[in-house]
Amino acid sequence: MFRIVPLELETHFAEGTVNAFLAIGDSVTLIDTGNPGKVSFQQLKSKLHTHGVTLKEIDQIVLTHIHIDHAGAIPYILEEIDVPIYVHEQARGSINVGVDEYQRVQAFFHQFLTNCGANPFNHIIERPFKEEKWRNITYLNEGDVIPLGGKEFEVVHVPGHSQSDILLWNQETGDTFAGDHLLKSFSVNAFIEPPNPGEVNRPRPLMQYRNSLEKVSRLPLEMIYPGHGEAFSDHLSLIKTRLLEQEKRCEQILAILATGGKCVYEICKQMYPRLHGNTVFLGLSQIQGHLDLLEERQQVSYEQKDSVVIYRSTWQ
């Protein structure tokens, strides 16, 4: 008999907890893994044990995306078992990277913060380089079908929150593992990310996210199992709410720019005055995504002064 078992794990991020899931039926699949670190890994094993499952009984792991609170336990799991790992193709350039790629990514974020008018040494989220050796990886693409607990789930690529985001959707029941693409408890940040190796322009994540929401709105989803918070249904109402929130943020930004040109950091200080230290990046990323959208709508323009990018309303 097929069943979905939520595993709520603690996290030091603002969300408070993160969800992993077991899909149990003809086989056992773990969807997402929680945070890095031995404490979180022990909590994962304890939660598995509570539901009568050991690591050795897991047949495969599927990752909804590779953010650290969803894929962080992979190295610890691989120390104990050999298990196939499934993740979207867009994660290929971020897995088992060497120090050169690590430095390229860090240089991108350093430059992004500088262009925003922020001091990168005060606000960068910098994690030390740590070599990882994931193995037995299969990369997924849009439309692939993967059995979870013996039931077939279709892969829906939904970039925006991250480049590797996927939904896993069962057409028969409408059951959907949504990762961080759809969260009922709070709005999703479409994070600024560097361009893929060999590419010049960074993705425009909020615009990707809006396209992904539009795609998902056409799917007859039923029960949605998110990366944070409780399971929910009625995704169409949630999508409508999230799009309205984005429009409200656009209006806030335009109101701030009505008094004159400003860099992203100056806008951030007005919109999110409580953000400090490396949490400032969250606000900068949110605002930059909305500025990308406003630029496409020709409601803002920008110019670079020295190393800082200044945005202005075109309505002035």
Image (tube, helix red, strand yellow):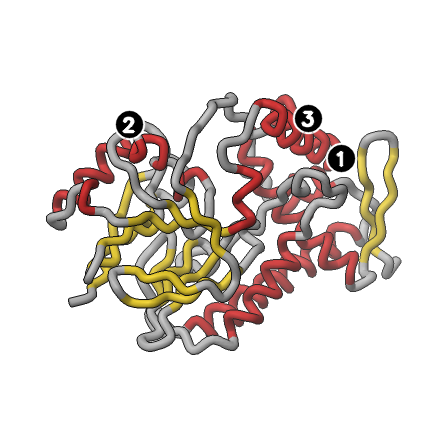
Considering only order in the chain, which callout, 2 or 3, is on the residue closer to the N terminus? 2
Q: Nearer the viewer, mark 1 or mark 2?
A: 2
Task: Say what amino acid the circle numbered 3 marks.
Answer: Asn
Q: Position of residue 233 (x, y in %)?
A: 36, 71
Q: Nearer the viewer, mark 3 or mark 2?
A: 2
- Crowd class of label 2 (few under 14; some 14 to 19; many from 20; radius 10 Å): few
- Crowd class of label 3 (few under 14; some 14 to 19; many from 20; radius 10 Å): some
Task: Say what amino acid the circle numbered 2 marks.
Answer: Lys
Instruction: Measure the alpha-carbon separation of dots 3 and 2.
Output: 33 Å
Q: Disc 2 designates what residue?
A: 38
The part of the image, by quadrant, that contains residue 279 is top right
Considering only order in the chain, which callout, 2 or 1, is on the residue closer to the N terminus? 2
Q: Position of residue 174 (x, y in %)?
A: 35, 74
Q: Residue 24 vs residue 82: left or right?
A: left
Q: Disc 1 designates what residue?
A: 115
Determine contact: label 1, label 2, CB under 8 Å: no
Q: Disc 3 designates what residue?
A: 119
Q: Nearer the viewer, mark 1 or mark 3?
A: 1
Tag 2's secondary structure? helix
* Image quarter (top left, top right, bottom left or bottom right) of the N terminus: bottom left
Classify 111 as above or below 165.
Answer: above
Tag 3's secondary structure? loop
What residue do we see at 24% from left, 61% from top?
A: 4
Instruction: Measure the alpha-carbon separation of dots 1 and 3.
Output: 10 Å
The part of the image, by quadrant, that contains residue 173 is bottom left
Determine contact: label 3, label 2, CB under 8 Å: no
Task: Say what amino acid the circle numbered 1 marks.
Answer: Asn
Instruction: Measure the alpha-carbon separation of dots 1 and 2.
Output: 37 Å
